[in-house]
Image (cartoon, rainbow, N blue to C red):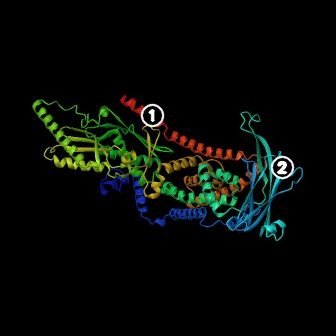
Amino acid sequence: MGEAVVGDELPKEQVEPESKSDPLLKELNEIRRRRTDGESRSMFAKKENPVLLMGFAYGILYGALILSMSSGLLGQSTSLDHSASTTFLDSGEPCIEIDEEPWILIFPNEDAEQFSLNAYNLPAGVAILEYNIQDKESNQNSPPTRVERVLDEEINRVSQREDYSTLEEGTYDVILTVKLYNNSDDAKNEINMTNTLSKSLEFELEIGTKGGIIPFIGGEEHRDVRITDSGSRSCWSIQELGNWAYILVGAELGGGRETAMLAGGAAGIPAWWMAFNSLSLSVFTLLIAYPLMYKVYHQEADDILSRNHIIRLVDDIITRCERRLGIVVDHDLAKIEPRELSIDIMIPYKNTENTLTDSKSIRDEILKEVLEEFALFRVFKPVQLTVRTIGSGQAIDFDSGVGVGVGNRDDEAPPENYTSFFEELHSLSRIEDEVRDSLDLYFVRDKTLDLQNAVITSDDRIVFVSVIFKPTTRLAFFRFKRQASEVEDELRNYIFERNQSLLTSQELIVKARNQVSTLSDRSGAGRVERKGDKDERIAAVARQDGFGGRMLQTKLLGDILSTVEYTANEKREMINKWGFWGLIVFVWIPFMASGVLVGAMLGLLSRMKFMRVLVATMVGGFIASITWAYTAEGIIKIMHKYKLEAVIPIMIIVFILGAILHIRSTKIRRQTELFEDTLLDNFHNDIKEKYGS
């Protein structure tokens, strides 16, 4: 593409007078100049790049922290949780630190209808366990069961089971006392006790049936234990916190912040740790995704193409391609419509005697030039391009060669001397045979290509060769780097060198197509969307350079980004009205389609300043993480109080399904709106009215 103009690659002195008389063209040239000059700036001259580096740095630090914690590299200490529990970060009582000191853990085993009684970090010697279950309502205390355990340096824990299968419904305390002595004699005489520790657990016992076909009828009797007062919680070790970090991040990615907090709260994870992981995910996502989105969507006000700019730019591209491809476009019927979600281009054209390409290839060629120009002007809306042949030449079959090179020759008189006609026919047949032999030899010599189909046709002006090839390289989709245009050039040169004496007055035209190439390969699109597997309509987005651009145009991230953009467009009016504070509230409030990513996109579309968007979404995400982390604790306590523990997994499932369904419905709504048929139907109707087909 030329630097000076949008149009034919003409010398500068031939273009400047036209641009002076055409304000739109002059503005396009000025934007082109600024875009070209701006690309050479230093990396750190762009404010989004340092933020992006900070995002990668934070992600590496956070990942290294969690990995070292979960792997046990930082040890099994509980001092981190204990220190946090003594500050404002923990709303409950300080947790019990269990580093090297003896400690007790009691929990129910409902399958065996027993309580597991455990004491850890006990020194060598003798341990006396005294345990029983007391009825809180009757205040009758049964004598405790006494068990003696001999410990050595390698065994630092004791375990015992207490049965509750014979208890009636009610409220109880399970009590465990551990007394430590140096030897059995001291234990027997209860003298020289070295240490003692005790813990009680309050619980409610409910008796129901399990396994019956009809509720309360049939099935087995089952006892359900609900802990009502477990006392101060035991501190979590560093490794346990690290392991739960993976679960919390995965739950938030899969079902949103609400799902992660409920899952962590149900497991008793400290609120401060849930908030830290949620906030870290928001920070990492925001500092990575926001600068990348900014690179894609942000433009200075003077560089944004208006509707008229886009129409003029595309019209110039069509005119240039019209001459190069040997077609005649009906400009009266052609439509160029910039819409909210896409730019729709519809081109009706006639084949001429100079047309040597089918409609799909013509679409690819025009789309390639459109996307190249759009990439330069940073227009990354999906482009829907429809081309349709009209007139008498629309029946030309470029795969078989029937009609190729035949234009409107109605004015030509039939030959009077049939001898010259048959001599010319014989000569053309000989040329086609020689060219076919050269073609076969080329593919025999080139072991990386396999000839799938070939058509050779000729007349007094041209020799047309159409080839479909397939790479023989294993995993050719990834490893085969030669473009079809390169194969065309090599094949043309090879055929011409072997048949110079025959190709004296005719032009040799070679068209080659890679059977395994994609539309993205042929048109240079960065990303392609389809309406359906059987529908030929496509929406192509201009390719972006650099690692970030290629990453955003992958299938997964491309779908996410387009859905986020669509959602942000739906909420834009609210942000336009409330600005900075409205953006904070939007990110903060927990409802579907909020969050730092959508908030950042909202700020971009509302043309807020870079740092204001970054600060607003960061503050909103911080408040949301804190709010949900500490709210989840209260929700879990209320559910325990009203015996609604079974609702917790249901709520988690509902949140996950709700997030999935919302994303899916948003994607479907966007695709439906993207591929609206109104304009295309009108286009085909106009052609039918004018040409009758």
The quarter of the displayed image where residue 546 is located = bottom left
- Tell me where residue 456 appears, x and y as whole percent: 23, 39
* Residue type highlighted by circle 1: Asn
**Closer to the camera: disc 1 or disc 2?**
2
Point 72% across, 68% down: residue: 124
Measured Cα–Cα span from mark 1 to mark 2: 76 Å
Question: In this figure, which residue is indicated by the disc labeled 1?
Answer: 682
What crowding class fits label 2: few (fewer than 14 Cα within 10 Å), some (14-19), or many (20 or more)? Answer: some
- Tell me where residue 142 appears, x and y as whole percent: 87, 54
Question: Where's the C terminus, which quadrant?
Answer: top left
Point 79% across, 49% down: residue: 164
Secondary structure under tag 2 reads strand
Contact, CB < 8 Å: mark 1 with mark 2?
no
Secondary structure under tag 1 reads helix
- Tell me where residue 464 appears, x and y as whole percent: 23, 41
Q: Is residue 543 visible?
A: yes
- Tell me where residue 521 appears, x and y as whole percent: 37, 48
Question: In this figure, which residue is indicated by the disc labeled 2?
Answer: 171
Q: Is residue 417 visible?
A: no
